Image (spheres, rainbow, N blue to C red):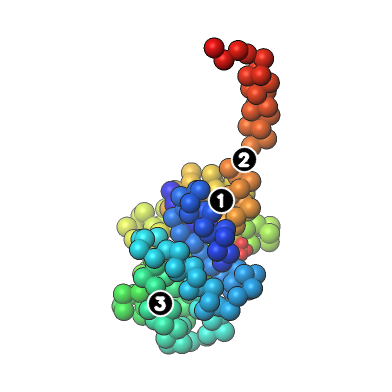
Amino acid sequence: MKFFLDSAHVHEIEHALTMWHFDGVTTNPRHVQVSGKPFMTAIKEIAALFSGTDKSVSVEVNPYHDEADAMVTEGLKLAALSPNFVIKLPATEAGFKAVALLKEQGVRANLTLCFSAMQALQAMRMGAYFVSPFIGWKESNAEEIRTMVEEIVAIRDNFGFETEVLVAAVRNGRQIADAAVAGADIVTAGFAVYKDAFDHPYTDVGLGKFQSFWDQTAYE
Ligand code: E4P
């Protein structure tokens, strides 16, 4: 299973690549805004970190575009900047169409803001490279999330679509494990989510106990 970092912070991405062997990055307008850098500066700096690798960096088109042609024009411009870029498009009628148009031109798309199995199915039909169900946002809205991921994976497998299921807006390690059990290909989450998920309080307690025994034992 692939782990992506949901971030536009260069130092977080570097850590995830070097220490955690992560497989890619997803960005969105919020992440870029938080980085404090202009959009183009931020994505070019991230692209440089992935140069020469086959890992992906998802970058999102202007969210004000409401026509497929505008999304495609910007998608082509962004894709020309880096072979690692996958173009994020919203789950709207225009976004679905743009997925297909970009695919015709050899550009990979990540269908984002996906909140239902039906939207995911349409993304797959249109040739999306990734489909990103946002589980955290649905959970915040008191909606069921586990079944949606299971259904999306089942639909993909039933019909042999090549789209990879990228579970997004993941909030904790339990959700990462659930996505893995459901057969998702990828999860993306923020730096702090992974950091917490890789830890466990019992590991710290156990280490402390073992250190105590170690101190009371001769080495030779
Ligand atoms: C993924 O591609 C999305 O950018 C992301 O998971 C959105 O979730 P957020 O609420 O953590 O920003």
Residue shown at 64%/28% (left/top)?
Answer: 207
Disc 3 marks which residue? 81
Q: Outermost residue toward the front?
A: 220
Q: Earlier in the sequence, mark 3 or mark 1?
A: 3
Q: Specify the quadrant that holds the C terminus.
A: top right
Query: Which tag is nearer the camera, tag 2 or tag 1?
Result: 2
Q: Is residue 22 visible?
A: yes
Ligand 1, seen in the image, is in the quarter at bottom right
Which residue occupies the foreground of this view, 120 or 104? 104
Distance from disc 2 to disc 1, alpha carbons, whole Å, reads 23 Å
Q: Residues within 10 Å of mark 2 (few under 14, many from 20)?
A: few
Q: Is residue 98 visible?
A: no
- Can you tell which quarter of the image residue 31 is in? bottom right
Task: Look at the numbered disc 3 and give the secondary structure of its residue.
Answer: loop
| Location of residue 173 in the rendering, given as x and y in whole percent from the top left corner | 59, 46
Residue shown at 66%/32% (left/top)?
Answer: 204
Q: Is residue 87 above or below residue 152?
A: below
Disc 2 marks which residue? 199
| Disc number placed over residue 146 in the picture, else none | 1
Q: Is residue 164 left or right of residue 42?
A: left
Q: Earlier in the sequence, mark 2 or mark 3?
A: 3
Q: Residues within 10 Å of mark 1 (few under 14, many from 20)?
A: some
| Disc number placed over residue 105 in the picture, else none | none
Residue shown at 45%/83% (left/top)?
Answer: 74
Query: Which tag is nearer the camera, tag 3 or tag 1?
Result: 3
| Location of residue 166 in the rendering, given as x and y in whole percent from the top left corner | 47, 58
- Can you tell which quarter of the image residue 85 is in? bottom left
Please state which amino acid type lies under the numbered disc 3: Leu
Which residue occupies the foreground of this view, 63 or 219? 219
Distance from disc 2 to disc 3, alpha carbons, whole Å, reads 37 Å
